[in-house]
Image (cartoon, rainbow, N blue to C red):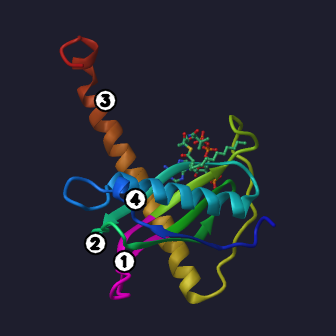
Amino acid sequence: MPGHQRETSFRFLAQPTDVNFGGKVHGGMVMKWIDQAGYAAAVGWSGQYCVTVAVGGIQFVRPIVIGDLVTVRCKLIRTGRTSMHFGVDVFERDLKTQAETLATHCVITFVALDAPNGKPAPVPPWEPKTEEDRLLEAYAVRVTELTRQLEAEIERVREAIAPDDLDGKAV
Ligand SMILES: CCCCCCCCCCCCCCCC(=O)SCCNC(=O)CCNC(=O)[C@H](O)C(C)(C)COP(=O)(O)OP(=O)(O)OC[C@H]1O[C@@H](n2cnc3c(N)ncnc32)[C@H](O)[C@@H]1OP(=O)(O)O
């Protein structure tokens, strides 16, 4: 039922096909897992098709190796009119020692659409209830602000170097 499931977790083993030459899971693979778990969380909350619109503050804190038990935990920390913001923690557990550590963290934002190629659609609102909820909501707002500042900076640099591209001096 939309508007009820605040947390979604995926759990699986890191496989040989997930790792790079150094034996560590690719950062891109971790981002794919985050995207998939976030997608499940966003569709679960909104009851609609959703697309990823931004990922902020991603940090690869610890490596994940083959055979580790991976947990991708998504927690809804803010809703806008059509957007949902999830705090995501990726944990790796060495099954031999049972020691679990945080491997990756980020905030991922999804927007619900009224159809797969449609327009942004309203989502059920989430209201913070505890002090921790309020802190997490403020954190999501701040991460979005910083992401937008980064986008503005990228746009500024792109415009500054565009004349060369237009002259055919760079590709
Ligand atoms: C039936 C078929 C089933 C298929 C089942 C297949 C399943 C298989 C497995 C799937 C596995 C995983 C899949 C993952 C999902 C993809 O990976 S989707 C692919 C990657 N994402 C995309 O292609 C999205 C591209 N972006 C867009 O199309 C447009 O930017 C969007 C998302 C439609 C938004 O358009 P827009 O014109 O910016 O709309 P606008 O009304 O201005 O903003 C909408 C909301 O976005 C927010 N927003 C916009 N930019 C940002 C930003 N940078 N930061 C934060 N918020 C932002 C706005 O603040 C606004 O929020 P609210 O204030 O309404 O809450």
* Comes first in the chain, label 2 or label 3: 2
Disc number lying in front (4 or 3): 4
Q: Which residue is mark 2?
A: 62
Q: Amino acid at mark 1?
A: Leu
Q: CA distance from mark 4 to mark 3?
A: 32 Å
Q: Is mark 3 within 8 Å of ligand 1?
A: no
Q: CA distance from mark 1 to mark 4?
A: 13 Å
Q: Which residue is mark 3?
A: 159
Disc number lying in front (2 or 3): 2
Please state which of residues 136 and 5 is positioned toward the viewer in this rendering: 5
The residue most toward the top is 167
Q: Amino acid at mark 4?
A: Val
* Comes first in the chain, label 1 or label 4: 4
Residue shown at the point (31%, 37%) measured from the top left: 156
* Comes first in the chain, label 4 or label 2: 4
Magenta highlight range: 88-106
The image quadrant of residue 86 is bottom right
Q: Which residue is mark 4?
A: 30
Q: Is mark 4 within 8 Å of ligand 1?
A: no
Q: Which residue is mark 1?
A: 102
Residues at circles 2 and 1 in contact by the CB criterion of under 8 Å: yes
Q: Amino acid at mark 3?
A: Glu
Q: Amino acid at mark 2?
A: Arg
